[in-house]
Image (tube, helix red, strand yellow):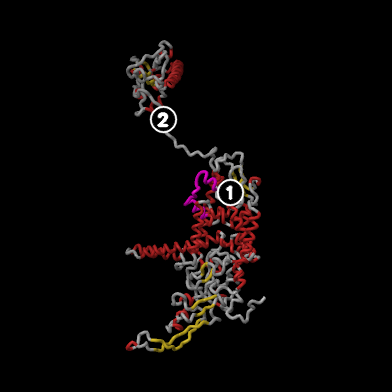
């Protein structure tokens, strides 16, 4: 196109459309086909030779082609005399070149290739594009049909999300370790739940001791591997229960890899992790999440609790089991969650059995039978204070909305105990702070709030070894390895000395203060009945960690967590509530699952008294003012029939007693008197074992007419009915 001043103007240049013009297409492909036509000479392009300075404006569409189109070349005849196509403007015929004209043909081909290069440069300068580009821009693929060729925009490619920094993806090894951690968490949590479901007996007890009952799996395995439980038992009793030696293996693992138990094994930690994934924290994004995952002062609270509980154990009480994560998980899930789910499932299956569809009824029956033999206990259980226990669990889980992994960071004494040993771990984090770009992705994904960011010392005692920081780092500057640079980490927990001493002193002083009432009156509470095989009360409180394994395994739902019946120190220790359930005569499962020896492992023969005195947990007494045969002259022998001992500890006295007729006499007179034969029950204290079966089956509502107290229990030499032969209050 001609621009002002005699300059050539490209079609796309501003101001090129002021003069009406036609589109110009240079068919370069046709020029390439000109080799087939063997033109002797190609007319020079006017604006290339300079003979014509300006190309005049065109009024019609014009296509210049220096050879046949590709389609015409394909359809051309293969004879020796071929007609030249009209596209080049030559109407003459040509001859097929001979084989001896090879040098001349090579020279002409070289000339044409040079000319082709110049034409392509011209086409690019004018904005026409290459033939391939014009073919892609044309709807039908024909380059000669378009007036002006436009370049087709390339298809948009999906741009991957760019990570901060260099965007280096995590190494394959760390990705494998991340999946290994997730698999480990799921596996150990599943194993924990399996053991918890198996902490039950679903068969029947034999009348004799010839067929002992044992659980098929070590359901107390997680408690035996708890080093904090072992430390409390050692401090209170000055010896470690044999089963707790497994905890030494966990301590060795901590010294090598750090707090790997918290991030890879702990079922309670996994529960918090899963809850945080289902219901993320309110500080889940941006600067708020970064700030939440920094190390804060409230994380020292778990260390103060740990020192307080250890000091309390030295004073003679394992009360720290109230905060031990494994004990909390067993107690909350075993006494609250599982019975609740069992109740809901039972109600749903019961409703399905009432549906008037035989197929639905059969499926419901088979499902209920399968659950009863594999998952649920024999019947629906209810535990005292279960709502409080479950409520505390929900509250702790809900705190993850404000502080991620709240329990692990703030309250867990086991995590603090492992953190003390983790400071010496051989495996730790090493970070190249010089290459760190401070993107804070390590802080966003950190579980332990152990300060993995640049320019800050890493707190190894808080690290859960989750490997999230290494996996999220876009610069690949974080590596967990053996023997890292120790200068990059804090060697010990950041604790204030005064607060540490105050917490230890408070824990040591709490136990004597809680025992003031016991010192004033050494007789135990009459309704505190411990499981069979329990050690003396003082030793019992030294060993019992409130794990609730004995309550979960009791087949008759007889054992329940105490509130303050045994004092503040006895909170959530097991006691027998006979009105809810009685102690099975030949059952010794509670001693089998106790991890600390608070309940000794006894045999069925020892409990039944075969060859030795029987194990007594209390004695039954009658309230004759409420007993039907005694107070109301009503026949009743339920308690005597249900007494499991041999010979029976409850015997009856046959008497004839006067009783008023229930109908009024004639003429409205007073009812007549008559005589009835009654069997009035009595208890033989020497034979009664205090199982509570009589209290359980007593038909008197409200307060039963027969009740059981702890007096006469085998574990105590002072808690007896008669004190003549004891050293009570002496020495």
Residue 364 image position (x, y, % from top left):
38, 63
Nearer to us in this view, 212 or 14:
14
Tell me the element at label 2. loop
Which of the two discs, 2 and 1, labels the residue nearer the N terminus? 2
- Residue drawn 39% across and 86% down? 660
> What residue is pinned by disc 1?
295
Residue 397 shown in magenta: no
Quadrant of the rendering where the N terminus is positioned: top left
Task: Specify the segment rendered in magenta.
Answer: 270-292
User: Dividing the image into 4 quarters, which one contains the C terminus?
Assistant: bottom right
Residue bearing the label numbered 2: 153
Left or right of 257 in this view: 372: left
Dominant secondary structure of the residues highlighted in magenta in the image: helix
The residues tagged by marks 2 and 1 sit, at their Cα atoms, a distance apart of 52 Å
How many circles with numbers are drawn on the protein?
2
Decide: is 333 above or below 643.
above
Say which element carries label 1.
Answer: loop
Tell me if I can see residue 218 in this picture.
no
């Amino acid at each position: 196109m001609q621009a002002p001043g005699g300059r050539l103007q490209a079609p796309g240049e501003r101001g090129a459309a002021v003069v009406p013009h036609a589109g110009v297409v240079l068919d370069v492909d046709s020029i390439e086909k000109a080799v087939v036509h063997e033109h002797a000479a190609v007319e020079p392009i006017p604006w290339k030779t300079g003979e014509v300075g300006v190309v005049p404006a065109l009024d019609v569409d014009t296509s210049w082609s220096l050879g046949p189109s590709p389609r015409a070349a394909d359809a051309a005849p293969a004879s020796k005399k071929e007609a030249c196509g009209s596209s080049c403007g030559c109407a003459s015929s040509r001859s097929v070149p001979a084989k001896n004209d090879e040098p001349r043909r090579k020279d002409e081909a070289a000339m044409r290739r040079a000319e082709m290069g110049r034409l392509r440069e011209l086409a690019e300068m004018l904005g026409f594009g290459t033939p391939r580009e014009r073919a892609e821009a044309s709807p039908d693929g024909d380059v000669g049909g378009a007036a002006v060729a436009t370049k087709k925009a390339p298809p948009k490619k999906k741009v991957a999300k760019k990570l901060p920094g260099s965007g280096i993806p995590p190494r394959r090894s760390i990705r494998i370790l991340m999946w290994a951690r997730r698999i480990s968490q799921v596996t150990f949590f599943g194993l924990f739940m399996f053991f918890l479901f198996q902490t039950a007996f679903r068969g029947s007890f034999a009348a004799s001791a010839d067929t002992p009952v044992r659980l098929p799996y070590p359901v107390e395995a997680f408690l035996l591997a708890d080093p904090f439980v072992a430390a409390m038992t050692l401090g209170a009793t000055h010896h470690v229960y044999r089963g707790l030696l497994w905890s030494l293996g966990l301590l060795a693992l901590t010294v090598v890899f750090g707090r790997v138990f918290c991030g890879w094994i702990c079922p309670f930690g996994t529960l918090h992790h899963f809850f945080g994934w289902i219901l993320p924290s309110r500080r889940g994004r941006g600067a708020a999440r970064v700030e939440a995952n920094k190390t804060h002062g409230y994380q020292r609270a778990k260390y103060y609790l740990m020192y307080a509980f250890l000091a309390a154990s030295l004073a003679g009480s394992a009360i720290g089991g109230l905060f031990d994560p494994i004990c909390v998980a067993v107690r909350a899930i075993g006494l609250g969650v599982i019975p609740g789910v069992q109740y809901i499932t039972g109600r749903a299956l019961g409703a399905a059995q009432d549906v008037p569809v035989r197929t639905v009824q059969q499926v419901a029956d088979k499902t209920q039978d399968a659950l009863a033999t594999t998952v649920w206990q024999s019947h629906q259980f209810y535990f005292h204070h279960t709502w409080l226990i479950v409520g505390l669990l929900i509250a702790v889980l809900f705190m993850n909305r404000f502080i991620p992994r709240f329990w692990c960071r703030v309250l867990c004494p086991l995590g603090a105990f492992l953190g003390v040993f983790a400071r010496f771990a051989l495996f730790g984090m090493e970070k190249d702070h010089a290459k760190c770009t401070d993107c804070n992705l390590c802080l966003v994904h950190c579980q332990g709030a152990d300060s993995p960011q640049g320019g800050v010392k890493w707190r190894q005692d808080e690290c859960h070894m989750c490997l999230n920081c290494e996996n999220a780092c876009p610069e690949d500057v974080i590596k967990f390895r053996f023997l890292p640079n120790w200068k990059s980490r804090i060697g010990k927990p950041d604790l204030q000395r005064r607060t540490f001493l105050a917490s230890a002193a408070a824990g040591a002083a709490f136990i004597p203060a809680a025992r003031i009432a016991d010192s004033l009156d050494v007789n135990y509470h009459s309704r505190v009945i411990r499981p069979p095989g329990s050690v003396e009360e003082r030793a019992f409180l030294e060993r019992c960690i409130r794990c609730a394994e004995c309550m979960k395994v009791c087949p008759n739902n007889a054992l329940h967590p105490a509130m303050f019946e045994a004092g503040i120190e006895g909170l959530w220790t097991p006691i027998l509530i006979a009105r809810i359930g009685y102690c099975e005569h030949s059952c010794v499962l509670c001693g089998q699952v106790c991890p600390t020896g608070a309940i000794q492992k006894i045999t069925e023969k020892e409990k039944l008294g075969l060859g030795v005195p029987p194990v007594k947990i209390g004695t039954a007494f009658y309230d004759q003012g409420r007993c039907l045969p005694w107070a109301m002259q009503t026949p009743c022998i339920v308690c005597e029939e249900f007494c499991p001992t041999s010979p029976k500890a409850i015997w009856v006295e046959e008497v004839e007693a006067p009783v008023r007729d229930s109908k009024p006499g004639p003429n409205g007179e007073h009812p007549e008197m008559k005589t009835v034969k009654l069997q009035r029950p009595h208890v033989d204290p020497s034979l009664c074992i205090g199982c509570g079966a009589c209290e359980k089956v007593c038909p008197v509502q409200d307060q039963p007419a027969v009740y059981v107290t702890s007096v006469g229990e085998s574990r105590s030499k002072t808690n007896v009915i008669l004190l003549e032969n004891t050293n009570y209050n002496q020495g």
